[in-house]
Amino acid sequence: MIKDQKGNAMIQVAIMFPILLALTFGMINFILIIRDGTIMESAARSAARELGTSKSLNSALNKAEEDLRAGLVSGTQVYIENDKIVVKKPVNINIPFMGKVNFSFKKESEFYTERDSFYYGKPPELQKSPVDEYSGYTGNPYK
């Protein structure tokens, strides 16, 4: 009778081990994909910030690629679409008993170009708008 229970335990271990192994590697892959997505989002934001401050498309794209290299994320595309910096990466996962799953991560960050730099570099008393003499410095009117 003890011999029979030992054999049952071996069968249970043989059945559960591949399932636990698949779950473990699935969690590791999921964590790595989420990590890449977070780094991609950060790279898109820093590229949009760079574009807003330097007004140079090349320096913004280089900043995004530099951040991706620092985060060890490879296989990405960085481009500008409308008013957004886009970072895109194809992801291929092989799920046991289900086959391959292909999708792509797309992270983007919108940037705005300042059209009127009337207030920049002026002290608060000289920041009055030529239209309504309202200052944009702290929201206080200077009339």
Image (cartoon, rainbow, N blue to C red):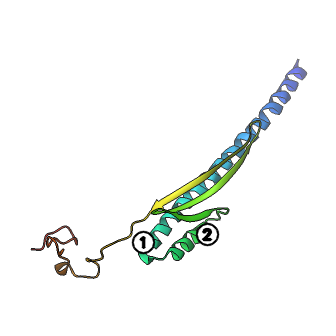
Q: How far apart are marks 2 and 1 (CA)?
A: 22 Å
> For the view shown, which residue lies furthest in the right direction?
3
Verify CB contact (< 8 Å) between mark 2 and mark 1. no
Seen in the image, is 20 located left or right of residue 89? right
Nearest to the observer: residue 80 or residue 51: 80
Mark 2 crowdedness (10 Å alpha carbons): few <14, some 14-19, many ≥20: few
Mark 1 crowdedness (10 Å alpha carbons): few <14, some 14-19, many ≥20: some
Q: Give me the residue at 60% from left, 66% from top.
A: 68
Count of marks overlaid on the render: 2
Location of residue 118 in the rendering, given as x and y in whole percent from the top left corner: 26, 77
Tag 1 residue: 52
Nearest to the observer: residue 18 or residue 38: 38
Residue type at numbered disc 1: Gly
Q: Is residue 2 above or below residue 126?
A: above
Tag 2 residue: 70
Front of the two marks 2 and 1: 1
Residue type at numbered disc 2: Ala
Q: Give me the residue at 48% from left, 77% from top.
A: 56
Q: Is residue 103 above or below residue 41?
A: above
Location of residue 14 in the rendering, given as x and y in whole percent from the top left corner: 83, 32
Q: Helix, strand, or loop for circle 1?
A: helix
Q: Helix, strand, or loop for circle 2?
A: helix
Q: Quadrant of the N terminus?
A: top right
Location of residue 31 in the rendering, given as x and y in whole percent from the top left corner: 63, 50
Q: Is residue 46 above or below residue 16?
A: below
Location of residue 87 in the rendering, given as x and y in whole percent from the top left corner: 56, 61
Q: Quadrant of the C terminus?
A: bottom left
